[in-house]
Image (spheres, rainbow, N blue to C red):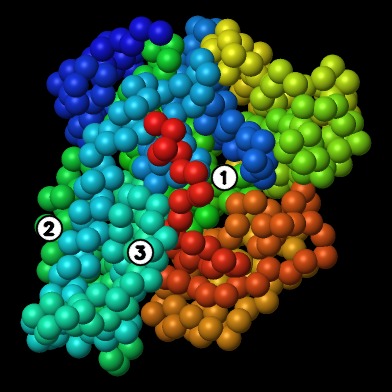
Amino acid sequence: MKLETIDKIAKKVKISSDFLEMYGKYKAKVDLSLYEKVKNNEDGKLILVTAITPTKAGEGKTTASIALVEGLNRLGQDALLCLREPSMGPVFGLKGGATGGGKVTIEPQEDINLHFTGDMHALTSSINLISAVIDNHIYQGNELNINPERIVWKRAIDTNDRELRSITIGQGSKINGIVREEHFEITVASELMAIMCISSSKEDFKRRISNIIVAYTFDEEPVYLKDLKIVNAVMKLMDKALSPNLVQTSENEPAFVHGGPFANIAHGCSSLIATKLALKLSPIVVTEAGFAADLGAEKFLDIKCRIGNLKPSMVVLVATIRALKMHGGVAFEDLDKENLDALKEGIANLHQHYMNLRKYELPVVVAINHFKDDTENEIKLLENWCSSFGIRYAFLDGFLKGGEGSTKLANKVLETLATTNANKFKYLYDVNDTIENKINIIAKEIYRADGVDFTEKAKEDIKRIEALGRDKLVICMAKTQSSFSDNPKLINTPKNFRITVKEVKLSNGAEFIVVLCGSILTMPGLPKVPAAVNF
């Protein structure tokens, strides 16, 4: 694999060097002023890549996204990739890197997985500046009447560190500040990351951060970031971070890698700024959403597309025979053995995700990531199942063969784009509906729950949001990624269950309502053997 210099990659999508800020030979920031130059271009076609419910076996969603772009380019079709940038927490924790695998990667891998162009540093610094100013304001007389027990803004670090989930700050003498309980979250779980990725411009970003609720007063009135008078300081720290990062795939195709909010607590999509720019630069744009279709795709379609006025053309739904067998009850250690009964059982998970996506009136192609242990009988069973339901599908061998092994999927995607009628894309719910009704629609239509139970705290939270006049916002469900339900142990397609909403939070700057179901950690811990020890 030989990398091209980033200026040559930029030329493939007609970006002149005047709009590039180089970070070495193989990375660059793209100046946002380019959008003004190309804004009248016709938008390209937007393809979302999503997946079945994740398992330990792996589904390869990012790998499939990269492979699709390489396959399209092998067929002579220009395409541009838009991915999230990795957090160092998972890189050194359980998951490892997030730059693809085998012969389909984004490069330079190590740079992207680690410091990259400094976006995570800018975010972390901005988040902690806000926290420092809040505590200093209280220490210096508390003119805003902030209740230290009602500070809702958390400090952040881009590392998995369970010890920081709940701590006490300000200990010691009075010169060390006010003693209070504090909580850290990983940088990518912060509302600031969500705002970076849902903003359409620098001006929109500034408007949104101004409206972040950082705390409440002793009278239960919200305190906004603009009240602290540091909006311009945050803008200075975030200025460069708001520009998309341009890199390349292992076959020298262009890729924007920009932003990466968690999909189980935020909306799990790369930046809207990068996506909108990509659509003006390329006839086809391939992007992904975090975790499975019940989280990532639902939020991409109902949150990102609604806020950004995006009109996706189709969806690619990634699955593996191995993962489907796990949903059918096979232990991870036995996945290399043929098991047709388990595969038949596990296909229900794929089917439910497929039918959910069709509710958005979008065409769907199933991409089956191929593994060497897949038997001929298993492959035939899955092919026959897809054919019996009239489902478009293609096997994908990008991991082993790169773009050459990705042309079947690319052909199926092009065939789908060419034969699909005018875009009929629609949202799942009316944003002007009540908070409870919007939550119920998602729970019943996507998770297939029997209903939703709201705790007393959740009911009070909803009343508070309604009193602020912020109830007509999109819903961002926060639940486990391991199940359609809010119980990670219920695999495949659970039945006869209800969703419990424990808490409802207003992300006022991001302009969505976060609905917490089950136990959601915004600061992960490290496993017994962290990925860091294998570097």
Disc 1 to disc 3: CB gap under 8 Å? no
Separation of disc 2 and disc 1 at Cα?
Answer: 34 Å
Residue 291 lies, with reference to residue 473, above or below; the image says above
Q: Give the residue at x 30% y 59%.
A: 156
Label 2 amino acid?
Answer: Asn
Q: Nearer the viewer, mark 2 or mark 3?
A: 3
Disc 2 to disc 1: CB gap under 8 Å? no
Q: Give the residue at x 74% y 51%.
A: 491
Q: Nearer the viewer, residue 54 or 384?
A: 54
Indicate which disc residue 164 carries. 3
Location of mark 1 (residue): 291
Q: Nearer the viewer, mark 2 or mark 1?
A: 1
Residue lying at the far bottom in this picture: please name it: 219
Residue 177 position by quadrant: bottom left
Disc 1: CA contacts within 10 A as few (<14), some (14-19) or many (>=20): many
Indicate which disc residue 65 carries. none
SS under mark 3 = helix
SS under mark 1 = loop
Residue lying at the far right in this picture: please name it: 341
Q: Nearer the viewer, residue 301 or 341?
A: 341
Location of mark 2 (residue): 232
Which tag, 2 or 1, sits closer to the chain's start? 2
Separation of disc 2 and disc 3 at Cα?
Answer: 29 Å
Q: Is residue 193 visible?
A: no
SS under mark 2 = helix
Picture coordinates of residue 368 (x, y %)?
70, 26
Which tag, 2 or 3, sits closer to the chain's start? 3
Separation of disc 1 and disc 3 at Cα?
Answer: 25 Å
Residue 516 position by quadrant: bottom right
Total marks shown come to: 3
Which tag, 1 or 3, sits closer to the chain's start? 3
Disc 2: CA contacts within 10 A as few (<14), some (14-19) or many (>=20): few
